[in-house]
Image (spheres, rainbow, N blue to C red):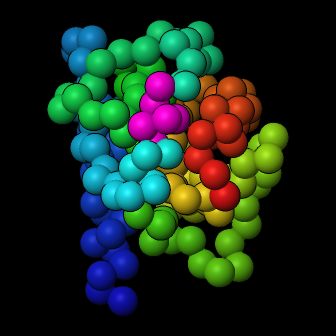
């Protein structure tokens, strides 16, 4: 049980950094380290992501990673190949958005993770954006590039 909060804290720290670093066009986001089929799917996804998302253009991330995408000044950040969400219980509610299941972390309401695919895709969405609009725009690339 002691390991569970640490896992949540680690994920939250990577996501929080993405949202708080906004002074330049490069945003710090801790990249995940997927392997095998998950890494290949994440590289495909990275190449297929939109240049604009909910009115925000793509921004650079530091350190550079094929598994991270950022829009705006970190208002929206995606990390592909993250671990299974620690807060996701077997009975957790998952919302289907255009064929992609998303788990919303109850402790971090701006954090969504796609599930039931070869790689978990985590998206952090600032409160001034509508999560539904962002997840709809990401559903197509996730569905096409990260198989179930």
Residue 34, image x, y percentages: 35, 55
Residue 114, image x, y percentages: 60, 52
Q: Quadrant of the N terminus?
A: bottom left
Identify the image quadrant of residue 105: bottom right
Residue for point 34% across, 74% down? 5
- Reply above or below: 136 against 102: above
Magenta part of the chain: 42-47
Residue for point 56% across, 18% down? 50
- Reply above or below: 9 against 121: below
Residue for point 46% across, 31% down? 46
Q: Quadrant of the C terminus?
A: bottom right
Residue closest to the eye, 34 or 10:
34
Residue 99, image x, y percentages: 79, 47
- Res 132 visible: yes
Quick check: 15 left or right of 28? right
**Residue extending furthest bottom?**
1
Identify the image quadrant of residue 106: bottom right
Quick check: 17 left or right of 15? left
Main SS, magenta region, reads: helix
Identify the image quadrant of residue 68: top left
Residue closest to the eye, 106 or 62:
62
Residue 66, image x, y percentages: 34, 34
Residue for point 40% across, 25% down? 70
- Reply above or below: 22 against 100: above
- Res 78 visible: no
Q: Is residue 2 magenta?
A: no
Residue closest to the eye, 23 or 45:
45
**Residue extending furthest left?**
63
């Amino acid at each position: 049980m002691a390991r569970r909060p640490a896992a949540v804290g680690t994920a939250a720290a990577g996501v929080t950094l993405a949202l708080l670093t906004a002074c330049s066009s490069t945003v710090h986001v801790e990249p995940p380290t997927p392997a095998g089929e998950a890494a290949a799917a994440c590289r495909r996804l990275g190449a297929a992501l939109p240049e604009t998302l909910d009115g925000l253009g793509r921004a650079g991330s530091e350190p550079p990673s094929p598994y991270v995408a950022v829009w705006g000044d970190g208002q929206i950040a995606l990390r592909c190949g993250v671990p299974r969400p620690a807060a996701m219980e077997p009975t957790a509610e998952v919302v289907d958005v255009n064929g992609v299941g998303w788990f919303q972390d109850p402790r971090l309401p701006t954090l969504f993770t796609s599930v039931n695919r070869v790689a978990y895709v985590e998206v952090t969405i600032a409160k001034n954006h509508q999560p539904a609009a962002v997840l709809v725009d990401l559903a197509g690339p996730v569905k096409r590039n990260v198989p179930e």
